[in-house]
Amino acid sequence: MKKAIFILLLALCAGTFTGLKAQCTAENLAFSAGENLSYKLYFNWKFIWVTVGSANMSIKNTSYQGHDTYQCDLITRGNRMADRLFVLRDTLISVVDKELVPYYYRKGALEGDRYTVDEAWYSYEGGKNHVKLRFKTHRDEIRESEQQSNLCVYDMLSMMLRARSFDASDYKVGQKIHFPMVDGGKVEEQTLIYRGKKTFKMEESKTKYRCLVFSFVEYEDGEEQEVVTFYITDDLNHLPVRLDMYLRFGSAKAFLTEAKGVRNPQTSIIK
């Protein structure tokens, strides 16, 4: 699930310290501390979908450098069968304040026999977004850098937390959203495409959801390549309930299996 949890971000420009900080803030309408989401992971193995692991995302109250903050943890684990083919142990942490401004990000990833650590620290002095980056490669090499931007810069988790409160009612099918994101010790522009609304039945369940559908895409030699198609509930929670992942070595899916501590009524469920 290296790029499995993305939702939408609109990067905003700024002119002063207070202006940038204000434009990077957002009212949280979607979640509260205590939310806990569980997922089951599937992989397409010789045309058969098999269970290969699980993921869990949780949100709690914490404190960071004197700020009242949320900490979001995302943990993915492969099962024994998957471990025979490819070991997957990813742990992601993101700290944002109560107005969803990011302060810290860490991703520790054991994928196969390669373990990497990706970290980012955010600050907002002088009217710009400053990001201090540290990346530890699988060879234990340390790469450090600092970047600054007139835009709000996010990582995959802080982006998701902020975007869950966005109103997508005015988006048009095919609309592209470009945004800067921290990943692998760099800040790079990414692209998201709104695909419209869709109703689907959850795997191994009779539950149906009304969803907003987005695609995360990359470009290689000018060709658009879909990386993840994800479904978020069309209600105030904007829960990511399904992800379709297109990997270099096959296809994978993730389905929500349990949602605890959800802030708003789940009005997107069709009974």
Image (cartoon, rainbow, N blue to C red):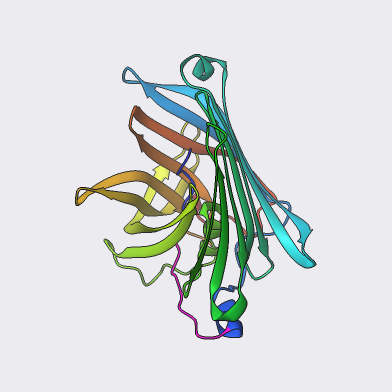
Looking at the image, residue 92 lies above or below residue 190: above
Magenta stretch holds residue 9: yes
Quadrant of the image occupied by residue 31: bottom right
Q: Residue furthest left?
A: 222
Viewer-nearest residue: 42 or 200: 42
Residue at image position (50%, 45%) is: 241
Question: Measuring 53% from the left and 18% from the top, which residue is drawn there?
Answer: 83
- Confirm whether residue 217 shows in the render: yes
Name the foreground residue: 85 vs 43. 85
Pinpoint residue 122: horizontal percent, then vertical percent.
61, 64
Foreground: 175 or 97?
Answer: 97
- Locate residue 256: give its quadrant: top right
Left or right relative to 172: residue 13: right
Q: Position of residue 45 (x, y in %)?
A: 37, 19
Vertical side of 256 occupied by 262: above or below: below
Boundaries of the magenta span: 8-16
Rendered location of residue 236, percent (x, y): 55, 63
What count of labels does the image hold?
A: 0
Residue 93 point in image, percent of width and height: 64, 48
